[in-house]
Image (cartoon, rainbow, N blue to C red):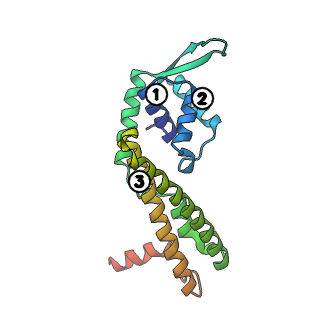
Amino acid sequence: MLSKLATLILGILAEQERNPYDITKMLSELQTKKWLPLADSTVYATINNLKKRNLITGRMEKSGNLPEKTIYSITAEGEYELQSSITSFLEEDASNSSGFDIGILLMYNLSKPEILIKLKKKLERLESNSYNLRKQILNLEMDASKVAFTSLAMLKHRMHLIEAEMKTIRELIKELNVRNTISELSPFDMRMLQSISQQ
């Protein structure tokens, strides 16, 4: 399976051939950096990697006095890999382990005030992202004929994920505010308790 970024790039090229600058611009317009941290240099490196693997091909194009630019298009092998990756991503379990899950599991290693500060900062960021995303969705829904329903569905999915994280953080803050200690048990003790209860 291809990386998320490689899949996005192939998807963009499957729609229409483009140069690296246009690909970077499209990824920026999709606001991918909010859910897929990447630098422009990573985009260019991924394009080179896709070219080496013969998943895309490039041709030089000159327009007027502008410098030559490479225009990329997807190959038949690229289309196969794209379809395979899309299938895998659609079948992927949304509960896959994430950094936030690990942070929650192991947060007892921090002091209670430190945890509360970190959670409140994250909640503020998520609330800001939620507001901006909600605004974007409403604007797009006003003229749904100008946006693909799949783009709208992806934005709504991002919104649902943000809302779920905000709910979790609010519950954690509430729980921490009523507890004197973070945990009486190691988070890994849960498995030991489950195995005892199954005997």
Q: Which residue is mark 1?
A: 13
- Whether 193 is drawn above or below 20: the answer is below
Contact between labelled residues 2 and 1, with CB atoms less than 8 Å apart: no
Counting residues from the start of the chain, the first of labels 2 and 3 encountered is: 2
- Whether 102 is drawn above or below 36: the answer is below
Contact between labelled residues 3 and 2, with CB atoms less than 8 Å apart: no
Which percent across, then down, holds residue 34? 56, 50
> Residue 39's quadrant in the figure?
top right
- Which of the two residues, 172 or 12, is positioned nearer the viewer here? 12
Counting residues from the start of the chain, the first of labels 3 and 1 encountered is: 1
The disc at residue 48 is none
Q: Which residue is mark 2?
A: 21
Counting residues from the start of the chain, the first of labels 1 and 2 encountered is: 1
Indicate the secondary structure of the residue bearing disc 1. helix
Instruction: Identify which residue is drawn at 50% across, 25% down.
Output: 53
Q: Amino acid at mark 2?
A: Tyr
Cα distance between the residues tagged 1 and 2:
13 Å
Q: Amino acid at mark 3?
A: His
| Dot 2 crowding, Cα within 10 Å, few <14, some 14–19, many 20+ | some
- Whether 91 is drawn above or below 167: the answer is above
**Residue 86 falls left or right of residue 103:** left
Q: Which residue is mark 3?
A: 157
Q: Amino acid at mark 1?
A: Leu
- Which of the two residues, 155 or 74, is positioned nearer the viewer here? 155
Which percent across, then down, holds residue 84? 37, 35
Cα distance between the residues tagged 2 and 3:
27 Å
Indicate the secondary structure of the residue bearing disc 3. helix
